[in-house]
């Protein structure tokens, strides 16, 4: 890799990357604390994890400018493990999660992203944008459902004005950073007494230290942590690869999905060894980074390093940041993340695409589980695709003397196999049957089984069957899985 390529990947604009990373670090603190509380662990676990994962994935990950840290999607999975077995088992599960993710990289599972349709990605993005906005409501509405003071709404409104207004004047400094600094200074000067980052939880005052999880190295320990590690690995990779695809589109660049799997794995192993919880890519923070001008790995590296500096060295100042300022930033993120054009294209896109997108959104919002929403979207996309492909299948037949010729066109697989079998007339008194497959392709074992049934059924009725025009790929599948061309198979069996 030459110096030009290295600079383009790491820091195409050093100043913008550093400023963007600074904004991300400030926004990471309350989220990491909130996710730690969600998982039932000390806030330092989320903060240490965010530092470790952000730094390691900045170096080893496959998507420059994408931020990875402790996340809510991962925190939800940990709750029962922490409650039943304690944090040491969480550290062990985090390390095992990383090992599984590295194995996924070696198996090149990142390539499976190409099977996720555009409609699923859009639904994922829209659902996440809505969840990000909903997550800000507790800061605007009290625990009893009472509206907070007018100062909160005024601060959020002013923050949004700065965020969207400043870029019209200058883009030298990211507007979210200016918003956080100005609103923090104003709140401290006026003594408004608003809810601050310090109210979220205690910030650590020391650096993370290396230590192996204090758990017995037994099969019983593996039995306990393996189910959680598998779930964490799947959720983490899914969210990370989906976020990478979104950042790819935002920056009009490509990324290595398999390298990202390995980077996430190394990040989680490091987090587990330094007293942190498992994490993955964060679409909200990634959008903040890209929107603030971050394009290189430096922005991610600096976000992690500056986060640790903030909580250890500048903790008393960081505690004074009003949550209203961060709410304004996250509202900007939700607005920028939502694919507004998808609402206009609901009536112009194919109905199946719109259903997939809406179903993905609905499942994510109902379950607050991004993995379930994406899974439903992928399954629906596959079903609609199978239905669409099956429409181009057909069988034509002509009687030439005493020989019935069937001409098959289209794709033969699980969705069309039964129609393929039903297209033949086994009661007809034909001397011979010719099945022309020049325009057909057999894809799976269901299709091969259907061909076996057709040929053997004709033979059972004493009719000679000839197959012509089968392509090489289909022939390979028939040779491996078929029965009709094997010796010793009785007609009708």
Image (cartoon, rainbow, N blue to C red):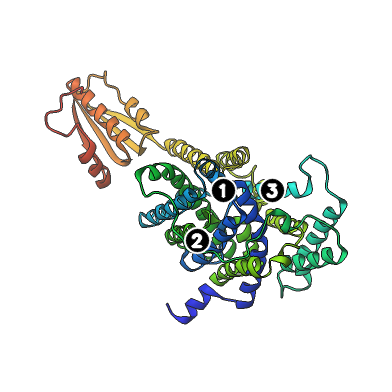
Determine the residue positioned at 17% across, 21% down.
462
Q: Is residue 489 above or below residue 168?
A: above
Cα–Cα gap, marks 2 and 3: 28 Å
Mark linked to residue 26: none
Determine the residue positioned at 15% across, 27% down.
489
> Foreground: 439 or 217?
217
Describe the element under mark 2 as helix, strand or loop. loop
The x, y position of residue 356, in whole percent, is 56, 41
Q: Earlier in the sequence, mark 1 or mark 2?
A: 1
The x, y position of residue 357, in whole percent, is 58, 43
Structural crowding at the residue carrying mark 1, measured as other residues with C-alpha within 10 Å and reported as few (<14), some (14–19) or many (≥20): many
Cα–Cα gap, marks 3 and 1: 14 Å
Q: Which of marks 3 and 1 is nearer the N terminus?
A: 1
Determine the residue positioned at 54% across, 70% down.
297
The x, y position of residue 337, in whole percent, is 65, 55
> Foreground: 309 or 303?
309
Query: 147 left or right of 6?
Result: right
Q: In this view, does 492 lie above or below 366?
A: above
Mark linked to residue 75: 1
Describe the element under mark 1 as helix, strand or loop. helix
Which residue is denoted by mark 2 in the rendering? 274
> Foreground: 171 or 371?
371
Structural crowding at the residue carrying mark 3, measured as other residues with C-alpha within 10 Å and reported as few (<14), some (14–19) or many (≥20): some
Which residue is denoted by mark 3 in the rendering? 135
Evaluate if marks 3 and 1 touch, with contact meaning CB atoms under 8 Å apart.
no
Extreme residue toward the left, this view? 488
The x, y position of residue 102, in whole percent, is 40, 57
């Amino acid at each position: 890799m030459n110096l030009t390529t290295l600079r383009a990947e790491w820091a195409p604009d050093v100043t913008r990357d550093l400023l963007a990373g600074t904004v991300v670090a400030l926004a990471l603190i309350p989220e990491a604390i909130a996710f730690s509380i969600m998982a039932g662990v000390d806030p330092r676990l989320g903060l240490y994890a965010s530092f470790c994962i952000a730094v390691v994935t900045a170096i080893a990950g496959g998507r420059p400018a994408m931020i990875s840290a402790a996340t809510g999607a991962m925190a939800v999975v940990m709750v029962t493990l922490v409650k039943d077995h304690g944090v040491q088992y969480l550290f062990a599960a985090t390390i095992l999660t990383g090992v599984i993710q590295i194995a996924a990289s070696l198996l090149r599972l990142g390539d499976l992203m190409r099977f996720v349709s555009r409609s699923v990605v859009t639904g994922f993005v829209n659902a996440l944008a809505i969840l990000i906005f909903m997550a800000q409501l507790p800061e605007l509405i009290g625990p009893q459902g009472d509206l907070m003071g007018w100062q909160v709404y005024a601060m959020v409104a002013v923050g949004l004005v700065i965020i969207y207004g400043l870029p019209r004047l200058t883009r030298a400094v990211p507007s979210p950073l200016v918003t956080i600094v100005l609103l923090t200074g104003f709140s401290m000067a006026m003594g408004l007494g608003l809810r601050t980052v310090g109210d979220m939880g205690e910030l650590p005052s020391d650096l993370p230290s290396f230590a192996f999880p204090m758990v017995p190295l037994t099969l019983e320990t593996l039995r306990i942590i393996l189910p959680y590690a598998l779930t964490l690995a799947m959720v983490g990779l899914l969210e990370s690869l989906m976020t990478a695809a979104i950042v790819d589109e935002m920056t009009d660049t490509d990324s290595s999905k398999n390298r990202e799997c390995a980077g996430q794995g190394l990040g989680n192993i490091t987090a587990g060894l330094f007293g942190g919880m498992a994490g993955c890519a964060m679409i909200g923070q990634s959008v903040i980074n890209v929107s603030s001008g971050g394009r290189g790995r430096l922005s991610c590296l600096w976000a992690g390093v500056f986060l640790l500096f903030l909580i250890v060295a500048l903790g008393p100042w960081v505690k004074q940041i009003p949550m209203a300022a961060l709410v304004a930033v996250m509202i900007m993120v939700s607005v920028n993340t939502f694919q507004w054009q998808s609402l206009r294209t609901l009536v112009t896109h194919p109905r199946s695409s719109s259903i997939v997108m809406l179903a993905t959104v609905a499942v994510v919002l109902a379950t607050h589980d991004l993995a379930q929403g994406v899974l439903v979207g992928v399954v629906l996309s596959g079903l609609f695709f199978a239905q669409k492909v099956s429409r181009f299948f057909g069988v034509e037949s002509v009687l030439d003397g005493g020989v019935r010729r069937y001409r098959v066109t289209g794709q033969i697989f699980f969705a069309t196999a039964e129609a393929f079998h039903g297209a033949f007339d086994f009661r007809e008194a034909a001397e011979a049957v010719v099945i022309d497959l020049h325009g057909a392709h057999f894809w799976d074992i269901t299709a091969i089984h259907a061909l076996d049934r057709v040929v053997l059924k004709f033979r059972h009725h004493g009719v000679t069957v000839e197959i012509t025009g089968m392509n090489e790929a289909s022939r390979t599948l028939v040779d491996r899985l078929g029965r009709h061309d094997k010796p010793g198979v009785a007609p009708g069996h």
